[in-house]
Image (cartoon, rainbow, N blue to C red):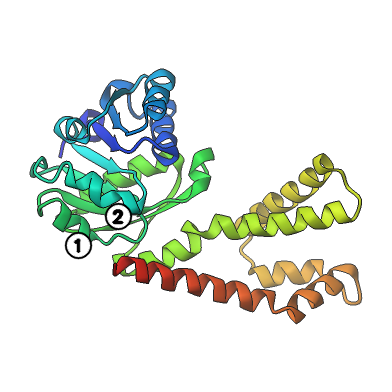
Amino acid sequence: MKPFAEITVGFIGAGNMAEAIVRGLIQGGNMTPERLLASDVAEERRRIFAEQFGVRVVEDNRSVVAASEVVVVAVKPQMLAAALETVHADWRPGQLLISIAAGVRAEKLDAACGGVPAIIRVMPNTPALVGQGLSAYARGPRANPEHGTLTEALFATVGDVLCVDETAMDAVTAISGSGPAYVFYWLEAMLAAAGDLGFDPVTARRLVYQTLSGSAALAAASSEAPETLRARVTSKGGTTEAAIRTLEEGRVKDNLVAAIHAAAARSRELSNL
């Protein structure tokens, strides 16, 4: 594998996640557009990559594999098999395939590529679109620590990066991959309550969004457990205690834990398809 400064990275699929990574690479000064390449079935997505980032775009996936040392497969899981079928015979020893398709195990990726490239699975999440993502990756067949370092460099442009064993990827999918949806669900509820209590949408958004982001920042900066931080806000007989009591009576925490387990179970099911 060439040094990071010399490699070409190609993207099969030019959707939102690929766009976030390309933006991070270019804006961070890690890569020039000339070292990036993308294919997509949608002309509009190719146009965005070409016009906004100056990246070379092509219609066929084979051109991406032919020109790249690293190929990021950034298509939806249900489209992955068809995308890899188009390039089955084109892989070269020494190449690295990075897949961000949820639920598709490394062994299936390896079989689809004829056992030629090194394989790494990555589970990013949507906050990557604003540079605040969490991307967990697992090394698969032929992937060595150098490949891991390269993967970290690529995904560090859109947030934090964590290395895990592939056996943990279903849990990662349930917690961080699907996790933004849980937060958005909570935001929906708080915004609805703010509206019920008489706030206009603009004020409600300001109250709710800053409360949530500020609380997350406080928790991240603190060495204390969330339970301790919550207790400090919860005065006996006060308003917060009344709210927490209602949440506990509704078993909100238990239900959220159960929901995450359900997501992990579904990820395992999809992995076995």
Q: Position of residue 143 (x, y in %)?
A: 19, 53
Q: Are marks 2 and 1 in contact (CB under 8 Å)?
A: no
**Quarter of the figure with residue 249:** bottom right
Q: Is residue 9 above or below residue 135?
A: above
Residue at point 34% right, 53% down?
77
Residue at point 23% right, 60% down?
106
User: Tag 2, which secondary structure?
Assistant: strand
Residue at point 82% right, 58% down?
193
Mark sitting earlier along the chain (2/1): 1
Can the viewer see residue 185? Answer: yes
How many C-alpha atoms fall within 10 Å of the one at disc 1: few (<14), some, or many (≥20)? few
The dot on residue 6 is: none
User: Tag 1, which secondary structure?
Assistant: helix
> Where the N terminus falls, by quadrant?
top left
Horizontal side of residue 82 vs 230, given as left or right: left
Viewer-nearest of discs 2 and 1: 1
Q: Position of residue 199 (x, y in %)?
A: 88, 47
The dot on residue 107 is: 1
Q: CA distance from mark 2 to mark 1?
A: 10 Å
Q: Which kind of residue does numbered mark 1 sit on? A: Glu
Q: Is residue 91 above or below residue 34?
A: below
Of 233 and 199, the residue lying toward us: 199
Residue at point 70% right, 54% down?
187
Horizontal side of residue 201 vs 154, given as left or right: right
Q: Which kind of residue does numbered mark 2 sit on? A: Arg
Of 186 and 42, the residue lying toward us: 42
**Residue topped by disc 2:** 121
Can the viewer see residue 97? Answer: no
**Quarter of the figure with residue 102:** bottom left
